[in-house]
Amino acid sequence: MKINVEMIDKKKEEQLLIQCYEVTQQIDEIINFVKSRETSLTAYCDSQIHFVYLQDIYYIESVDNKVFAYLESLVYELKIKLYEFEELYGERNFFRCSKSVIVNLMKIEFIKPALNGRFMATLNNSEKVIISRQYVTELKERLKGGL
Amino acid sequence: MNFNDFLKKCLMNFFIIVTCVSVVIGIIGLIYEPNRRFGYEAYFSPLIFGAISTISFFVTYSKKELTVRQMIFRNFLQLLVLECLILITGYSFGIMKDKMILTSVALSIVIVFIIVHIISWLLDFKTAVILNDSLKAYQRNDSNTTL
């Protein structure tokens, strides 16, 4: 495999581009390695400490003053307040969609209307998250950058 | 939604309802009693019915985010409260003594309630289409720039 390293201006965002014929196990290993160098959070499950990668989180929910991170099929408790998470990672594809939930925009499969001006986001793992009426305008603005 | 925002929404609903009630009274009056004449006090009835109808919105208020099922139940409850409040008030003030008028008003409330919800759902559906398009573009954009 040919490797090219290109120096870029500091104003530009660093990126790793893989050009391949198909995504093989070797490519997956490279991706996982790069992912492992990305931001991870300390999470707790059954009194055990785990490291959760930010991009693997589907949504964050605050329940009775505890904050939980929902992954594809696992749930971890985070020792961080919801607003702190929003402040730290709000710029990185995470969006506050209701008073108690922050959703990963990259994990949303589709959005459909719920009742009374609210919307329901169905995630890639089929879980559903409510988007409150008051956050809809903000979501539109946030997604505008993608068009 | 906090309580202040809810009150603002109620005030908006009040003025919409007053307009709609005036139209409904006009249509029903023209059908059943086209020759009847009223005094100036008749101008207050849409306002009274508007205020009564706005009370029914308090059934839908919740500090916590309601699920779709809970919202459907609350909307159904709102319709029941609305019917009871309007028919009891109308009957007590002698505006709706006739069985035929009572039935027409009850039916009108159901029809208006359903139409309002259908229109609201259609508008939300349109918004959902825009959100889904923006979301796909956002996700494509982000996949191209980051892993």
Image (cartoon, coloured by chain):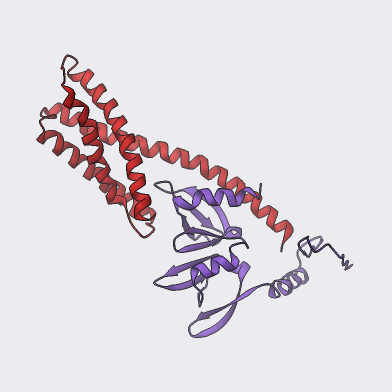
Q: Residue at x 36, y 36 (%)?
A: B116
Location of residue A48 in the rendering, given as x and y in whole percent from the top left corner: 52, 85
In which quadrant is the N terminus of chain B drawn?
A: bottom left
Q: Is residue A59 above or below residue B141?
A: below
Judge left or right: residue B98 versus residue A41. left
In the rendered image of the structure, the colour used to display chain A is: purple
Judge left or right: residue B46 versus residue B66. left
Location of residue A6 in the rendering, given as x and y in whole percent from the top left corner: 87, 65
Location of residue B57 in the rendering, given as x and y in whole percent from the top left corner: 29, 46
Quadrant in the picture for residue A93: bottom right
Q: How many marks?
A: 0
Q: Residue at x 73, y 58 (%)?
A: B145
Chain that is red in the image? B
Judge left or right: residue B102 versus residue A105. left
Location of residue A19 in the rendering, given as x and y in whole percent from the top left corner: 82, 61
Given the current orientation, which residue lies at the most extreme top position?
B35
Q: Is residue B44 above or below residue A33?
A: above
Q: Residue at x 22, y 45 (%)?
A: B81
Q: Residue at x 87, y 67 (%)?
A: A5
In which quadrant is the C terminus of chain B drawn?
A: bottom right
B56 or B147: which is nearer to us?
B56
Q: Is residue B20 above or below residue A119?
A: above
Q: Is residue B70 above or below residue A87?
A: above
Judge left or right: residue A50 versus residue B32. right
Given the current orientation, which residue lies at the most extreme front position?
B40
